[in-house]
Image (cartoon, helix red, strand yellow):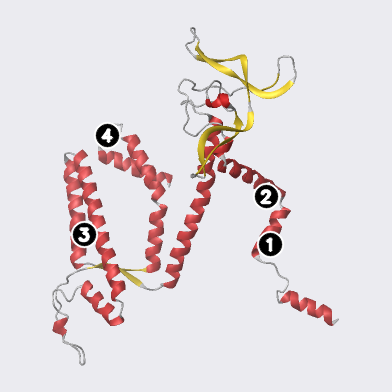
């Protein structure tokens, strides 16, 4: 009886409990579709990794006179029906004089056998290991006596079979890399936000502030030391706080970042203003000058007299929103380029792009 109670007690205390990864592995083993999907992914990733070895041609190899060639027919039997080593025939290009379309016909007077694990075009495995071993091919392939286009060619005469596996490298790895980058950014920014929760970061510290007359309280330092035109600014107050709390290096780093931000903002504003004014005229030009003048005046006022402090978690949230808006920026550039061919005012084009972006996302 006591053994039963001891067993129940150990199970209740979690002595035989399973970890998260053990439970995940158990569910994976019990799911047949997950096992088959893992096998398919493993095959695809292996083919993408060894794309140079699997493909008979390099990624950029093109045959200008062999555009849109249909897939090369591989023969496994001779004319009399006997099984033989796989071979291909030479493809000859001609133009139909009635339809003026290109036609590709096979000339099987000479057969070109396909060998496996044969030398071919040189390449660098993993980008730095020189190799020339290919899964299939033959000496005739490098000498271009015949061609091996298993899936045909594209409009530039490039082998589709080889390029599919080169393209699979990007298609299969971009999702993993994006997830890893998002995970690292999320962990870093989330950790900073949690550690400095409730703290405030000064984005703008003005150099000056108009003097404010007030009387010194009993036991307080002379009020005249803090009523000066320069000493009353947010920058001076931040310096005094940094000296008092012994955070001078952190304050100086933040100050450098602040001035770098203002320099970058000024450069962006100047470049944008110069580009917009060069393509605008009439009322649009005057409105643009008014808007950019107001922005420049606001920046100067904030630089001299401004004071802006935000919470760390709120700053990280706004930064995350900016990062999430980057794909929309590329869409904005594409739409601007597409609408540039139409004869319309730049302000109309700008509003149209904004309307499309608002509708999309």
Label 1 sits on a secondary structure element that is: helix
Q: Which mark is residue 23?
A: 1
Camera-side mark, 3 or 1: 1
Residue 26 image-quadrant placement = bottom right
Residues at marks 4 and 1, CA–CA distance in whole angstroms:
61 Å
Which quadrant is the N terminus positioned in? bottom right
Depicted 325 relative to depicted 169: above or below: below
Give the residue at the far top of this rendering: 98
Query: Does label 3 or label 1 sit earlier along the sequence?
Result: 1
Q: In front: mark 4 or mark 1?
A: 1
* CA gap, disc 4 and disc 3: 32 Å
Q: CA distance from mark 3 to mark 2?
A: 56 Å
Residue 81 lies, with reference to residue 37, above or below; the image says above
Mark 3: few/some/many CA within 10 Å (<14, 14-19, 20+): some
Give the side of residue 279 with respect to residue 169, left or right.
Answer: left
Residue situated in front as seen by the camera: 91 or 236: 91
Q: CA separation, marks 3 and 1? A: 56 Å
Instruction: Tell me the residue at 29%/68% (across/down).
Output: 254
Front residue of this view, candidates 87 and 361: 87
| Circle 1 residues within 10 Å: few <14, some 14–19, many ≥20 | few
Percent x, y of residue 56: 56, 31
Dot 3: element: helix
Q: Secondary structure at mark 2?
A: helix
Closer to the N terminus: mark 3 or mark 2?
2
The answer to whether any part of residue 149 appears in the image is: no
Q: Residue at x 50, y 27 (%)?
A: 154
Which residue in the protein does label 2 denote? 34
- Which is more foreground, mark 4 or mark 3? 3
Q: Which residue is mark 3?
A: 299
Q: In the displayed orientation, state which residue is furthest to the right.
A: 1
Residue at mark 4: 344
């Amino acid at each position: 009886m006591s053994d039963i109670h001891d067993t129940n007690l150990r199970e209740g205390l979690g002595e035989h409990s399973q970890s998260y990864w053990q439970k995940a592995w158990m569910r994976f083993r019990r799911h047949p579709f997950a096992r088959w999907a893992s096998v398919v992914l493993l095959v695809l990733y292996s083919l993408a990794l060894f794309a140079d070895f699997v493909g008979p041609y390099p990624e950029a190899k093109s045959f200008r006179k062999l555009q849109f060639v249909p897939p090369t027919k591989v023969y496994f039997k001779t004319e009399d029906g006997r099984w033989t080593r796989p071979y291909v025939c030479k493809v000859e290009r001609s133009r139909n004089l009635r339809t003026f379309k290109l036609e590709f016909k096979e000339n099987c007077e000479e057969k070109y056998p396909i060998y496996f694990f044969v030398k071919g075009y040189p390449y660098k495995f993993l980008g730095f290991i020189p190799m020339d071993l290919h899964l299939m091919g033959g000496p005739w392939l490098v000498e271009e006596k015949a061609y091996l286009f298993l899936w045909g060619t594209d409009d530039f005469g490039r082998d589709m079979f080889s390029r599919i596996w080169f393209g699979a490298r990007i298609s299969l790895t971009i999702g993993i890399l994006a997830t890893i980058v998002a995970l690292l950014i999320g962990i870093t920014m989330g950790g900073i936000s949690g550690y400095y929760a409730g703290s405030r970061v000064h984005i703008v510290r003005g150099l000056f502030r108009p003097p404010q007359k007030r009387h010194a309280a009993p036991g307080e330092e002379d009020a005249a030391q803090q009523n000066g035109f320069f000493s009353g600014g947010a920058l001076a107050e931040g310096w005094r706080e940094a000296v008092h709390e012994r955070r001078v290096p952190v304050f100086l780093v933040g100050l450098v970042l602040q001035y770098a931000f203002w320099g970058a903002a000024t450069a962006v504003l100047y470049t944008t203003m110069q580009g917009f004014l060069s393509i605008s005229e009439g009322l649009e030009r005057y409105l643009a000058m008014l808007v950019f003048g107001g922005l420049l005046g606001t920046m100067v006022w904030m630089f001299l007299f401004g004071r802006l402090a935000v919470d760390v978690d709120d700053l990280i949230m706004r930064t995350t929103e900016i990062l999430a808006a980057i794909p929309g920026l590329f869409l904005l550039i594409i739409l601007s380029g597409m609408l540039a061919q139409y004869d319309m005012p730049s302000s109309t084009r700008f509003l149209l792009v904004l309307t499309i972006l608002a509708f999309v996302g």
